[in-house]
Every structure is written in structure tokens, then in C-alpha cells.
Amino acid sequence: MKKIENTKKINLFKKIFIKICRILGFEIIDQSNFTSPTLGKNLNEMLSDQGKKSITIPLGQVNIIKKVKSFKIILRTCTSELIMDQNKRRIFDCEKNEYTFRTLRSIIKSTNIAIDKFKNIKFEIIVTDTNSSQEDLEKIKEILSNFKATSKLSSINLDNFKNKTKGYSKAKLSNMANFYNSLLIAKNEDADLIYFVEDDYLHSQDTISEMILTYEKFYTIFSGEVILLPSDYPYLYSKAENTKIFLGERFHWRLVQESLVTFMASKDLINKYFSKLEIMGKEWIDPWEKPLHDIYQEFPCFSPIPSLAIHCANINSVFGISPFIDVKKIWDQNKK
């Protein structure tokens, strides 16, 4: 009987101790059953508290200094051009609109999951389109109807940009105008984070949640802005460059010096470098992404390992599909 009383006392003390830890903001780990009593979670679950603290086992806790309150996705679409100024075919050999539709579906799935997790973040998707058929635009609207937050679709009048972008092919003009328009949206609308996306990236279900939590964590660690990419590009492994690896929420992130034009950054950073980024809407320099690369010399840019999104380029492209990813599975998951 005495043994039962001792057990009750131990359990009572444990409950009181857990409550005190919660009040003080400390987390405790019960390594005997791989749980966190203060969080009421298994250690395999997401332990971080968005906007407050990032928790990584076994490294501990990082108290977040910048909370993300709004997240805007700007998806640039064009279903009429397979690969800009090229005759190459993409993986799976489909028409361009199929990549656009599956990209949008994958983004919506990933963002809807983030919406359910992060109740205090305001989400929005804006689709900016050039040269897509009316039938394709109606299909985009249909897919957008599955989004749990605010969404918009707008078609860009290329005549408004021809004076800014002279002497380029129709495809380059379309690409430059769409990016320029995206910058204007980012500059003129409120959002903490802006995710600029091209319409040939298939996203995993973890993409948006991982990027938000990792941004908050890295901003705290580096005491300033960072840029995040969703894709682990093959070209990153074709150069013998020095790099560094950091732990995000549940992925490793690699410091990189280059990217394509799908990236996530804060509105503050976009405003600061608007005039530099604006060049990409006016000139096609080689490489076109050079203004972005220049920014990465001042603020760190990171790419996930393994990839959070697959770039559906030609199978031989060093800027295309990421290594060690089941591309076919992700492709099939985003079929209608």
C-alpha cells in the first residue's frame, strides 16, 4: 500500500513540475518514451511553435525574433510556351498547361496544410498570367476554388510593358513582364513574406510549412533577412564550391550563391532591392538572374536537402529535377 502512495506522490510532483515548466516557457523531454510532456507531443512530431520558438532535437530551442503574420504566393503562369525559346521537351512530355495545372494543385495542397497549422498567418495566392488561352484560365480558376484562403487571377496586358522591354522575343517579353508585374504586386501589397513561383515546380506537402518555420528560425540565427529556395538543383553539385549546412525545421538547408527565379523573400528585402530586381523586368542579361545572385552576396540564400519542390525541366537540364527524389510519385499525386 505504501508503494502505491509513493507512486501517486511521484505522479503528482511530475504534473506540477510540467505545469511550472509550461508557465516558465521551458520544454522538457522524456527520453524513456520519446515524448515532450510539456508539449504533449511525440518527438517525431513538429515541436516548434510558429512565431514563438523553434525546437530541434537534440539542439534545443531558438526563441523567434520575427513572427510571420502574412504570406503571399505570386505564381507566374504562361501555358502557351513549353520551354522559353527552346525546342526541348520537359519530363513526362506533356503540353505546358499540364505543368501549370499540377504546379498550382501542389501549391494549394501544401498551403492548405500550412493554413490548418498556422491559424495566425494570413495566406493569399495571386496568379499572374501571360498568353494563356481562355480555356486554360478557366481551368486555373477551377483549381483555385480549392484554396482555403484568398486567391486572385489576373491577366497581364503585354502592351503596358513593351516600352520597358524592347527588342526581345515574345517568350522573353512575356517572362520579363510577368516578373516585373509580380514585383509591383509585392511592392504595393502588404505581406511579410513573398513567394515568387514559376509554373513548372511541383511542391511537396511540406514545402510551405517548412519554408515559413525555417525563415523564422534562420532570421533569428542570422539576426537578419534570408532568402529561401524550394528546390535542390542539380547544378549545385556540378561545382566544387564551399558551402555550409544548417538545420531548418525538418530539413537540412544548404548555403548557395545562385538560383533561378523561384524564391521566397521578405517584403522588406524586396523593397530594399526593388531597383536592382527591376532590371530583370527591363533587360535580359546573362544570366538573367544576376541581380538576384548579387543580393545573395549580402544576404544568405538557402536551398533544401532533399528538395521541397521539383523543377519540371528537360531530363538533361542541370537546372531541372532534383536528385534522389521520387519525381514520378509527386507528378502523379498532383493529377486531377
Image (cartoon, grey):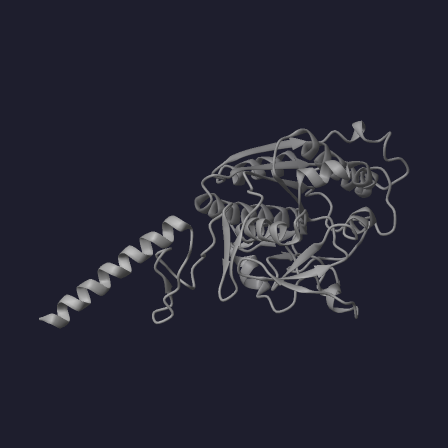
Q: Give 219 or 258, whichever is nearer the viewer.
A: 219
Residue placed furthest toward the right: 167
Q: Position of residue 66 (x, y in %)?
A: 58, 43
In the rendered view, would you say 232 is above or below 298? below
Q: How many marks?
A: 0
Q: Position of residue 154 (x, y in %)?
A: 65, 31
Q: Give 211 or 16, whichever is nearer the viewer.
A: 16
Residue 115 showing in the rendered view: yes
Q: Give 333 or 196, whichever is nearer the viewer.
A: 196
In the rendered view, would you say 156 is above or below 71? above
Q: Position of residue 34 (x, y in %)?
A: 38, 68
Residue in view at x 34 percent, y 52 percent: 20
Q: Position of residue 162 (x, y in %)?
A: 84, 31
Is residue 17 found left or right of 254 in the rendered image? left
In the rendered view, would you say 246 is above or below 133? below
In the rendered view, would you say 316 is above or below 295? below
Is residue 211 found left or right of 130 in the rendered image? left
Is residue 16 found left or right of 75 in the rendered image? left
Q: Quadrant of the N terminus?
A: bottom left
Q: Quadrant of residue 258?
A: bottom right
Residue in view at x 35 percent, y 72 percent: 32
Residue placed furthest toward the top: 160
Is residue 73 found left or right of 35 in the rendered image? right
Residue 316 showing in the rendered view: no
Residue placed furthest toward the left: 1
